[in-house]
Amino acid sequence: MPSASYAAWLATLGIGRTDFHEEPRWRLGDWSFFTLDGPFLDRPAAVSPTGVAGRDAPQGWYALLAHPVEEVAPRVAWLLGNPVPLGPADPVVPGASIAAPTLTTTGDARVLTLWVGWPPAVNDPVRVRITARPDGTATLEETHWSEVK
């Protein structure tokens, strides 16, 4: 049961709360997306039988990134705090070249790269890169446009 898995994951973080809810609009295959009610709203996570994916949960990213990029990108943005995924048509920084989200395979790793912005200040978008491996390890890098240009 996904909600039990989410509660168990919260417990590993020292958060023994059960006042959370699922966000049904984000369901994807066997993945369910949860967030806490009230304080600690920065702990959203995706839960499936294969693991948990979120800022503090690297083990599930590899399985989650098996889905098509157009389905994964908005869900990852939600997991990161609900920024807006950006693409080439978004006028965020004059002269900026913001690429559409990509999901590639490099060796045994799956790599998702997308640009996001937090309204109303989307003038310094953030490049998010998640590199996930089948052994359950993952890295999440966030780089502001001002650092990339």
Image (cartoon, rainbow, N blue to C red):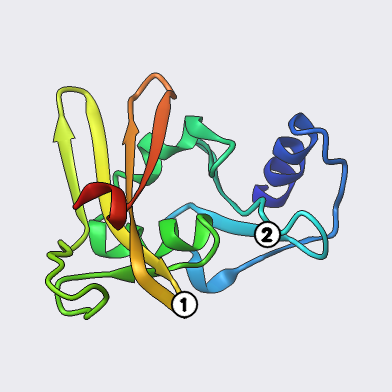
Q: Which residue is mark 1?
A: 119
Q: Which residue is mark 2?
A: 35
N-terminal label among 2 and 1: 2
Q: Quadrant of residue 124?
A: bottom left
Q: Amino acid at mark 1?
A: Pro
Q: CA distance from mark 2 to mark 1?
A: 20 Å
Residues at marks 2 and 1 touching, judged by CB atoms closer than 8 Å: no
Judged left or right of residue 22, residue 149 is left
- Can residue 124 be seen in the rendering of this structure? yes
In percent of width and height, residue 61 lies at: 42, 38
Residue furthest top as drawn: 135
Q: Secondary structure at mark 2?
A: strand
Judged left or right of residue 137, residue 37 is right
* Residue drawn at (47%, 80%) of the image: 120
Q: Quadrant of residue 114?
A: bottom left
Q: Amino acid at mark 2?
A: Thr
* Residue drawn at (38%, 39%) of the image: 141
* Residue drawn at (52%, 56%) of the image: 79
Q: Residues within 10 Å of mark 1 (few under 14, many from 20)?
A: few
In percent of width and height, residue 20 lies at: 77, 60
Residue 20's disc number: none
In percent of width and height, residue 86 lies at: 28, 70
Q: Quadrant of residue 136?
A: top left
